[in-house]
Image: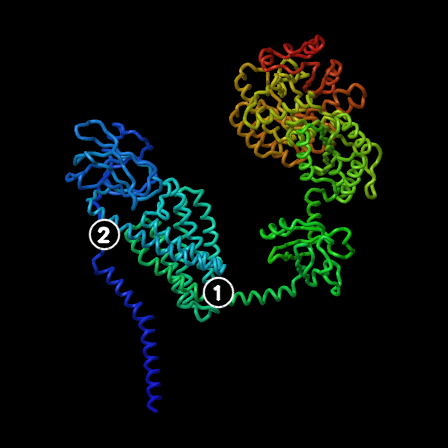
Amino acid sequence: MMDSTITLNDRTRSGASQRITEVLSIYVLPLFICLLSLVALLQLPAHYPSAAGFSLSLQTLPAPYAQTPPSSAIQTALAKQPSELRLSTHDPFWLQFSLPEDFDSTAHDIRFATSPLLGLHCYGTQPEQEELSQLPTSALGSSHGYDLQTNGLAPLGTVYCNVLPSVSGPFSIQNWTSSDWAQASQRYTRYIALLEGGLLTLAALLLVIALLNKQSLYLLVAVWLVGNLRLGAMAMGWDNLWLGHELPATWLPTIRQATLAAYFLVSYTLFTQLLRTVLQPLPFSLLLRALQWGGLALLPAAFLLERSLFMPAMLLLSAIGLLSCVVIVCYGMMHAEQQPAPLSLWHIMLLSASLCVLVLMLLMLLGLSSNFLDTFQSVLALPLSSLMVAILLGERLREERYSRTVAEQTLIANHCISPFGIFTLDENGQFVYANSVFYAFLGLSEHEEIEDYQWEQFFGTTDWEAIIQTSLSGEDTDISRLSAASHPGLPQQFGLRALRTAGVIEGSLQDISKRSETIRKLKQMANHDPITDVLNKRGIEKALSFSLDKVREGNNCILAYLDLNYVKHVNDAYGHAAGDALLKEVSHRIETTLHPGQELGRLGNDEFLILFNDTTPEQAQATAEKIIKSLNQGSIYAGNRSFNLQSAIGLVELSSDTRAEDALAAANRACRDARRTQLPSVLYKQGSTELYQHAEELRLFKELENGASGGLYLEMQPLMALQNPLNSLNVEVLLRVRDSRNNLMPSGKIIAAAEESGTVSIIDKWVFAATLEWLDKHHTQLPRTQQININLSGVSLNDDKFIDELFTILENFDHLANRLCVEITEGVALQDLERTRLFMQRLQHKGVRIALDDFGAGYTSFSYLQELPTDAIKIDGSLIHNMLLKNTNVAIVRTIVELARNLGMVSIAEWVEDVETLHILRDIGVDYVQGFVVSGARSPTEILAARDIRDLVKSPEVLSFIDKHSR
């Protein structure tokens, strides 16, 4: 009984002592250590007392860095600058300061408190010297700053320094006693050793754990601790040191920015990893994603942006991160009961640690006191880091074990229901394992042994190393089944991924047959016309670019431009189905005529391009004429209708310096020439006059677009009155163009090309402005000139910008508007009757007269005359030129003249080339005539020199006609 009592008492005492030991170890001793540390920090004298130097006033002047003494101008400018104790700048500057009155070079030291500099040169006056001499400076070893050698300098002496900072930071000058400086250096060195040694030891411990356990999270924490170390170094100004070695000063700006950006990114990654289960259910995914992308953007920005741009972005992102932590903590605590993984105490402590670190970053970015940052970092950084390690070694391990279990179960489930074919190969390519999906891909029955087959039997020789590298990058490798191993109904195209592990190859196959077919069709659609199945605009332009590359290598190529000029009419008359059927038949006929290597493309509605690769110009033109013959001779049956085409084709020989757009424009011009001359084809060879003229056209249009008009000039052709020729000297303005060699270029082709390129409005504007300027300058010399006719292009008539500019020009010459007559082609006028009518009314309101040009040229337009406010009708020259061949022609002209007279309009006949026609036109009542029988085009100088129409006429018969009918 006694022994039992003793044993029970021993156990009781043992249990009590265990509890006492645990309480002392877990609660009392940590609390005592904390209290003692707090008392030591606040009450006990420091073993390394703080000491401070006396700050000297300085005057600064921004100036380029130079290793020469300051000039007298700089000294004078410095003396006028205000004094300050401290400045912060990134730019080079001069400074001036005076030594204290009690300065003793044997007992005092002058220190420059600053971040590492790229350059520092100081100058002072030595005793018994008037000129400035350089003063030696040296970088301080254990702390940041520089020491000025002041031996021989007297009190109140002036020192000048030229400073080139490496990074933006505070700069001040301090006068230290030798003893105070020794204490400050010891204290500073002690803090560096404490912070660097503690954090690097923790980082090394975690690195070992990460390597042994192959856990990246431990490595992440180690990197984060090193980031703490560098952040503290920046706060205390010794980030130019690393493991006792000094970094070059030129590296510091980039290193600082990269450190801040990398630390923010690592902190975000670390905390989101540790708090993953807590953060997932919270409604802050967008906020966290914004922080993540902001951190990713900061990292390259640290290397690319200047400090003035980078620091505000870093400050803003840190402030957002701080606010995010506060919001997450508050929200988690307020909704703790509603969350599946509520914030626990360690979560709150961990978020608090992140708050402290972000506060440190914000304070440092705002440039607050370094003493405060020093204490904050040295006192709180290590406890916070230790807390991180403790949390990591506990809760995170439990979460990872749980996650691994769930992942294993999920992998097993996915393996059973996956649509991928899974297989395993040995080093010899022999199958070791395959799932049921893979069996189905190969067409094998489940009773067959997969080990009896090799990979090469189905897919041939495979570069597994390349496939593995592609798989590691997250992409599939497309492979095809061998034809010998193919059977109807089996997949043909696969996406392959593979990895090498434990001496075998683990891989997966995905059936992509349908996707591959879809991609093939999409590529076909991207480069081919859906109606004709020939190349579309994009495809033929790519083919043209390829052909031009071949031409530069020495090959031949001819580009052809085919214009049907009929499809729009078919679409309008019979519908798009008929037009599409016609296009298909045309494409078929062209393709049957072409040889291998020659490519056909549809450029627009009824425009085709043909590339004659490796073909001589003569061969290409012969093939082109066969194409035109197949299209133009006989009817083309498309659908239930037959069509007769009048196609034309233009060809251009490409050269090594031809641009794609220039080649298209030249081929288009050749096609227009073919249609104008009614030839089946026109070929522009290299060095031909046509190509030269086309190049000159392009040059002219480019000059016009740039505001120049050197190649343009005006000529004028007289309009002779038939009733009283001597009473007037009216003219029509004609455009003339000279090339760069001063040769005359055909105006008709220039205007046609300008209408195609959209440059004709610039030409029309120039003609109007030049004519009015000439008339304004010489109107007193033109008493008989009552009217000057100017032609207006149909393209310009439909250009609202041109019309506004035209009326602006007319406003500048308002007093001359009543002497202008604008000629508008009848066909253009009838395209948009209402627009034309409004435009004519605006011109007439300004006093300008209107003439309807080319009247009767293929239009039955008499009914429209009463709707258009026209002042004159200009009868088309084709009616006048052939008037005497048939009496019916005279009757037509007479009808037009009588119609004009009845409507109160003036009639003008052009292309008058003989005196007989002149007499008949007068007899039927024509008011004015224009043509070579009277006079050709004359220069403005000749018009000014003429007293009346007789001075411009050379024909005696016409002169006799004038004398006879003049009053």
Q: Quadrant of residue 784?
A: top right
**What color scheme is it?**
rainbow
Query: Farthest residue in the left direction?
Result: 102
**Viewer-closest of 400 and 905:** 400
Residue 517, visible in the rendered structure? no
> Could you say where residue 190 lies in the image, as x and y percent from the top left?
28, 52
**Viewer-closest of 907 and 428:** 428
With respect to residue 582, does 758 lie above or below? Answer: above
Image quarter of the C terminus: top right
> Could you say where residue 290 lies in the image, as x and y percent from the top left?
47, 54
Query: Farthest residue in the top direction?
Result: 956
**Viewer-closest of 90 and 83:** 90
Q: Amino acid at mark 1?
A: Thr
Determine whether, in the image, residue 58 is placed left or right of residue 249. left
- At x 55%, y 14%, the residue is 781
Q: Quadrant of residue 10?
A: bottom left
Determine whether, in the image, residue 307 is placed left or right of residue 703. left
Mark 2 highlights which residue?
A: 50
Mark 1 highlights which residue?
A: 277
Q: Are marks 2 and 1 in contact (CB under 8 Å)?
A: no
Label 1, secondary structure: give it. Answer: helix
Query: Farthest residue in the right direction?
Result: 634
Label 2, secondary structure: give it. Answer: loop
CA neighbours of label 2 inside 10 A, class few (<14), some (14 to 19), many (20+): some
Q: Amino acid at mark 2?
A: Ser
Q: CA distance from mark 2 to mark 1?
A: 46 Å
**Viewer-closest of 289 and 580:** 289
With respect to residue 822, does 258 lie above or below? Answer: below
Q: Earlier in the sequence, mark 2 or mark 1?
A: 2
